[in-house]
Image (cartoon, rainbow, N blue to C red):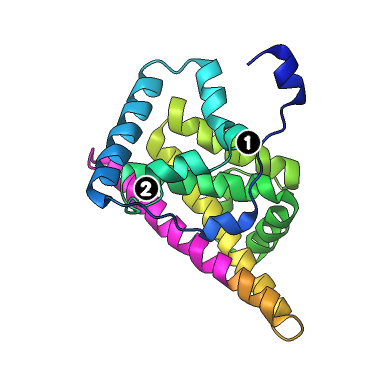
């Protein structure tokens, strides 16, 4: 891409609703084969030689290219596989980038209500505003490619649990006056809780060299 093109290039943004989107494919066996081969090849290549510029591009991938390319590769993979893990982590990152102010609201509410070590594991500063949460999720993503992969998954799981707690309590706040908004936050809380459980399980699988 030329310098002139870069000047006028606008990052592709996707709404937070894509966090709950499903994609279809015609040949599940072929999709599964491609998903696993691309995920393993990408991770092995980058972790063997984690050049800063390449890691930067992977961390910023959805900001520049959106989510559709990754969806075609990994969205139908089971949660507790390597492609399924990478897909969920990119979704989590995009949810924070897409609406950091809501993410910050949920995180601070979750931190106050949860009463666990998850906020320490996640590693967010206190208080954590929108900019801090964007930086945190990008740091966690970077850890996938140039740090301890299992630790990055544990941090992402802890982050998701704090967000889920915040979404649950915010949903309760809106239940009486704005039931549709309460329902949206409840859906987000359930999905985040599922992601947290899956990411924790995948961290354990990675440590046993069993994340396929």
Q: Residue at x 34, y 48 (%)?
A: 202
Left or right of 180 in this view: 68: left
Left or right of 175 in this view: 193: left
Q: Is residue 82 magenta?
A: no
Residue neighbourhood size for the residue with mark 2, other residues' Cα within 10 Å, grouped as few (<14), some (14–19), many (≥20): many
Query: Predominant secondary structure in magenta?
Result: helix
Seen from this angle, which residue lies furthest bottom?
Answer: 176
Quarter the N terminus occupies:
top right
Residue that badge 1 annotates: 63
Residue that badge 2 annotates: 84
Q: Is residue 147 placed above or below 74 in the rendered structure?
A: above
Q: Residue at x 55, y 70 (%)?
A: 187
Query: What separation in Å lies between label 1 and label 2 (alpha carbons)?
Result: 20 Å
| Residue 74, visible in the rendered structure | yes
Near-viewer residue (42 or 100):
42
Q: Position of residue 7 (x, y in %)?
A: 76, 21
Q: Element under label 1?
A: helix
Q: Position of residue 156 (x, y in %)?
A: 50, 47
Q: Position of residue 12 (x, y in %)?
A: 65, 38
Quarter the C terminus occupies:
top left
Q: Residue at x 71, y 49 (%)?
A: 100
Q: Which residues are magenta?
A: 187-212
Mark 1 or 2, nearer chain start? 1
Quadrant position of residue 182: bottom right
Residue neighbourhood size for the residue with mark 1, other residues' Cα within 10 Å, grouped as few (<14), some (14–19), many (≥20): some
| Residue 155, visible in the rendered structure | no
Q: Residue at x 47, y 51 (%)?
A: 157
Query: Disc 1 vs disc 2: which is toward the camera?
Result: 1
């Amino acid at each position: 891409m030329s310098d002139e093109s870069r000047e006028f290039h606008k990052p592709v943004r996707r709404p937070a609703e894509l966090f709950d989107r499903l994609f279809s494919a015609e040949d599940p066996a072929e999709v599964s084969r491609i998903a696993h081969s691309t995920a393993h090849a990408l991770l092995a290549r980058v972790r063997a030689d984690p050049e800063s510029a390449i890691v930067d591009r992977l961390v910023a991938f959805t900001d520049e290219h959106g989510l559709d390319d990754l969806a075609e590769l990994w969205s139908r993979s089971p949660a507790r596989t390597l492609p399924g893990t990478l897909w969920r982590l990119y979704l989590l990152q995009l949810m924070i980038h897409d609406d950091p102010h809501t993410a910050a609201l949920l995180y601070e509410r979750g931190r106050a209500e949860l009463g666990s070590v998850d906020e320490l594991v996640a590693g967010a500063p206190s208080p954590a505003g929108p900019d801090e949460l964007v930086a945190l999720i990008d740091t966690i993503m970077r850890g996938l490619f140039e740090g301890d992969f299992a630790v990055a998954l544990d941090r992402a799981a802890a982050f998701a649990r704090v967000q889920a707690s915040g979404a649950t309590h915010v949903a309760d706040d809106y239940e009486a006056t704005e039931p549709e908004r309460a329902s949206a936050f409840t859906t987000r809380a359930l999905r985040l809780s599922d992601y947290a459980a899956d990411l924790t399980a995948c961290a354990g699988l990675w440590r046993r060299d069993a994340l396929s």
